Image (tube, helix red, strand yellow):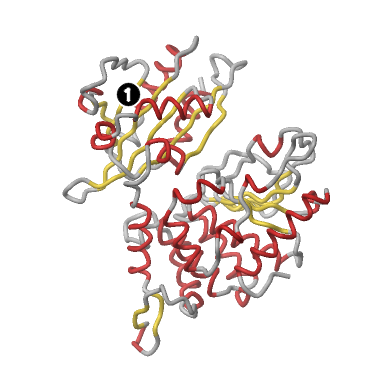
Amino acid sequence: MASSSLPAFLATAKEQYLTAVHDGTAAEWVVVMGNEAGDLDSLASSFGYAFFHSIACKTQKVVPLSQTPRNDLHLRAENIHAFELAGFDSDKQLLCIDDVPLTQSNRFPSTQFVLVDHNRLLQRYTENNPSARVVAIVDHHEDEGHHKDTADPRIIAVPTGSCTSLVAKLFKEQCPDSMTPELATLLLSGILIDTSGLKPGGKAELADREAAAFLLPTASQSQNQSLVWVAGAGGSQLELDIVGLTNVLQEKKASISHLSTYDLLRRDYKEYSLTPHWAPSEPILVGLATVPKGLKPWIPEDEEFWMQTEKWMDERCLTVLGILTTFRSKKGKHKRQMLFIIREGEERDELATRLWKGLEDNEELKVKRKKLEKFDSQRKDHDENKMRIYKQRNAHATRKTIAPLVKHIVEQN
């Protein structure tokens, strides 16, 4: 059974799991993890599902895992703030990917995985690990069609604004009395930051609103003095100020002025192994980094922009890097831009032709090509077959839209 509080559960699970790894018994454990971008929705969902699993399956052998290396946790100030509101210390109680040593045969020590906020197990967990299997999925991204024979439950609900809403729904339907103030605060934070505070006309769906309504009374029982309270319905009882909490989380998320280009590229990053249909024997790696900053101020103010971009592509062995920016204009209007860079190689011309055409013809993104020199007048080699900048006229289209599109462009004839 789960410990009575989220911090105690996390601390115990981390300690006992690492002991199991050392003893060679980690295969008995279920590892719950969000996607490699490591946003608040992913981490909160992994904590929540692990806590739920321990109750529903009456087991202590379940642990949430952050795919973000420990030294990179600071890149997301909003995560650290939400952890503090939930009453736990990420340095002591959060299990990170680099905390877990590989076995002597160079494989990940566990074989049972739960995927939240994504629905395809990454190669790093299956390599040299033939017994690896996905035992459950809870996600709100496009279904990639994997793990249908092993995942139970296999919940992929599109559209849903936040994966944490789907985790909250499991508690609501199966064990509502097990929700704790700390976990309710963390899950609610995940919903608010992914739906802009349940903004009407935004990403929030009915499932998100119902989940928030379920979580709010329990979160309002928190004793954390950093939270702000307002009068509830009828004014008789105080409840958590979700508008205030949303504003603080968004401010933390936007606080990136101290981060370098290299930091920004790895802060919110996902990677995809794709097989070009015109060269099926040569898979390529495509990286998509979401950055809350416009390209026009960013590129000129960082003289190492291109060098650090190239460094990241080299480090990750990328064929294509897409930098997806999201920001507000001086008038407060939400805008998005994309910078795509293609590495030199034998198949670059074919890849470039298909990628540029696929992006420019897409009716959902509604991109407008921009001149590179308008963003960097100092750079002389503006090879527009190697890199292009686009304005997205549909500012609602996020990586959830762009990643499947790029996959389709590369893999479909």
In the displayed structure, would residue 300 be above or below residue 181?
above
- Quadrant in which residue 368 is drawn: top left
The residue lying toward the viewer, choosing from 317 and 395, is: 317
Q: Viewed as shown, does residue 112 lie left or right of 192?
A: right
Q: Residue at x 37, y 21 (%)?
A: 357
Q: Residue at x 48, y 66 (%)?
A: 84
- Quadrant in which residue 20 is drawn: bottom right
Q: Viewed as shown, does residue 404 lie left or right of 91?
A: left
Q: Viewed as shown, does residue 327 lie left or right of 219?
A: left
In the displayed structure, would residue 384 be above or below residue 136?
above
Residue 266, percent from left and from top: 46, 39
Question: Around disc 1, counting alpha carbons within 10 Å, would you say few (fewer than 14), some (14 to 19), or many (20 or more)?
Answer: many
Badge 1 marks a residue whose secondary structure is strand
Q: Which residue is mark 1?
A: 388
The residue lying toward the viewer, choosing from 341 and 377, is: 377
Residue 255, percent from left and from top: 34, 52
**Quarter occupied by the N terminus:** bottom right
- Quadrant in which residue 193 is drawn: bottom left
Q: Residue at x 37, y 75 (%)?
A: 228
The residue lying toward the viewer, choosing from 148 and 384, is: 384
Residue 125, percent from left and from top: 69, 39
The residue lying toward the viewer, choosing from 182 and 213, is: 182
Residue 307, percent from left and from top: 38, 25
Q: Quick one: which residue is furthest to the top in this view?
A: 346
Q: Quick one: which residue is furthest to the left in this view?
A: 331
| Residue type, numbered disc 1 | Arg
Q: Quick one: which residue is furthest to the bottom in this view?
A: 236
